[in-house]
Amino acid sequence: MAEPINKVWELRSPANIEDTWAVFSDTDRFNRVAELGFRFEQLQLSDGSVRRTGKGVFFAGITAEWEELPWSWKAPEWYRSTRRFLGGPAEEMTVQLRLRPEPDGGTAVRYSVSVTPRNLLLRPIVMADLSLSSAPKVERALTALLTELSGRGTPPCLTPPDLSPEGDALLRRARIEPPAVKDALSKALRSLPLREQDRLMPLRLAAEWRLDPDTLIVGMLQGVREGVLAMRWELICPSCVGPAQRVERISEAARVHCSSCNIWFDRTFPDAVAVSFRAAPALRPEDVPVECVGSPSKQPIVIFRERLDPEGQVTQTLNLKPGAYRVRTWPPRESAILDVLDTPTGDGTARFTAHDDGVDPPRVVVGPGEQRVTLQSRAARAVEIAIERTVRPADVLSAGRLLSMPESRGLLPAALISPNLKVESMRFTTVTAPPPRAGAQLDHVERLLRGHKPRRLIVGERGALATFDTFATGLAAARALALAGYGAAISVGAAVEVQQQENDPVVPMGAPVEDALSMLAEAAPGRLILGRGLERDPEVAEALKAAGLGVTAGRAGSTLGV
């Protein structure tokens, strides 16, 4: 193999490292600004895995195809991407970004491209393409992104085309209330980059525009009614919490593949369904292709990811905030939890080992701040291993929250709901239990919950979820789980039960369901966690007093003595 040809850019961003990372790690956007014109495809293999390939024009106009290998990164410091070409003059290309904070608050940026020719005879062709074609495009993108970080505007190539006269008239006529919501939406549909218009997140926009979230949600549903917006149900990947698939019916149950993480997941649990909007085709008929898969920005909860060969090992110093982090592998195996407490704990180190059947130990407890984390592999094959936050981003609008708003139901588009849709509002208690390490024990968890006659019960890869009519009954079920050595989380509040068709399953949704699911990672074996602040709820306080249970406040909720 010939020696690689390297091109390096040393630059400076005026923004801090977190803001610089947010812009540069969005490589789909980077590729658009560079106008690289890449296209990607996925092929499901016989073993259930997915092979990702890309196509682009390189090397003096030659269309090249490559296999997109899994990315590696440590947020917000560096990423590395390797493409293995399936033909043409180049064998392999690796792109790396490294960021370093500077004393004045800015960030040093090092961006490098390394291309390995297939042989020495093809080296001049590869060198000419890198210098005359690829490098100018990369430089254009780097300059544009640094200009944006300095506050001097969005790259011109991302500015959307003007609306057609018909689209403009439709937007002006749209009946959207109140006026502040219509004004904000009109500005967004005229000026936001097309990719951002392709996935409009109400909760994120409400925070940016300083609008009441529920008011904006209703206004966007009015926009759907008026034909200027379209609404979509999305199946959310539990790893990257991005949209893995769009479906027509909320209750569709299937195993779903996430192209960003390259994993299959069980979408049985109700928090897997979310809602987003996009500019309606009458306003924006343009297709918005994906120009990069596997990008760190598509997996915002993953703070570190690396490939480990058999017997391989990597150690990184991570600045960890209090909370639970999941240590996960690809191909998927049993994961582990890195539990970061609020107070200093341990010696500042943690170690996990990936085996063929899972990651050990199941849980490691450390303190906040800088921790030296070692990941090693004893698996027979190479694995991808990652450390990810378990907190769901606050800007994801769940189907449960949407359907819990009575004012929203009459505005839901008929194409996305069944005419037989039933939504019943009620108050119930939700108990969740993370999956035990031994798969057979999940049957025991199910039997324990059934013994307390739950209203609804869901069992899947993420564990078990049960709802109960009273908090006292739910508390008894959760205590039984904890006393049996399983973890459990419990929450209570106003929620809904949703059924699309008469023979479809009834799905519990809403705040207590999402609250209990969000605490799954905190529920260590033998630990019972109550949703934050719920000890002040009269029904909860009465049940806790009757059971003689004490409450200890924690970061995700309150720990109950069992």
Image: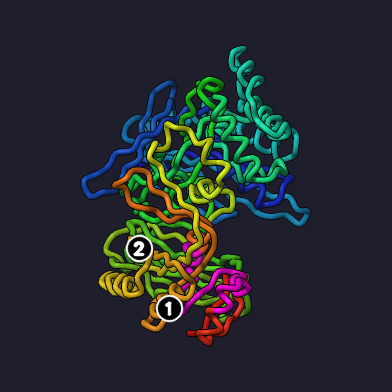
Q: Earlier in the sequence, mark 1 or mark 2?
A: 2
Q: Secondary structure at mark 1?
A: helix
Tell me the quadrant of the picture where the N terminus can be found: top left
Farthest-out residue, left:
46
The kind of secondary structure element at disc 2 is: strand
Tag 2: amino acid: Leu
Residue at (60% x, 71% y) in the render: 537
Q: Does residue 81 show up?
A: yes
Task: Indicate the quadrant where residue 116 lies.
Answer: top left
Q: Are marks 1 and 2 in contact (CB under 8 Å)?
A: no
Q: Position of residue 430 (x, y in %)?
A: 46, 65
Q: Which residues are magenta?
A: 516-542
Please provide percent x and percent y for residue 51.
31, 42
x and y, in percent, of residue 161 in the image: 61, 19
Identity of the amino acid at label 1?
Ala
496 part of magenta stretch: no
Question: Which mark identifies residue 457?
Answer: 2
Is residue 389 visible in the rendered image? The answer is no
Tell me the residue at 75%/53% (across/down): 105
Q: Which residue is mark 1?
A: 476
Residue sitting nearer the eye, 117 or 516: 516
Looking at the image, is 392 positioned above or below residue 423? below
Q: Residues within 10 Å of mark 2 (few under 14, many from 20)?
A: many
Task: From the viewer's perspective, tell me whether residue 559 is left or right of residue 504.
Answer: right
The residue positioned 48% from the left and 63% from the top of the image is: 428
136 in relation to 47, above or below: above
User: Which residue is at the far bottom?
Assistant: 548
Quarter residue 312 falls in: bottom left
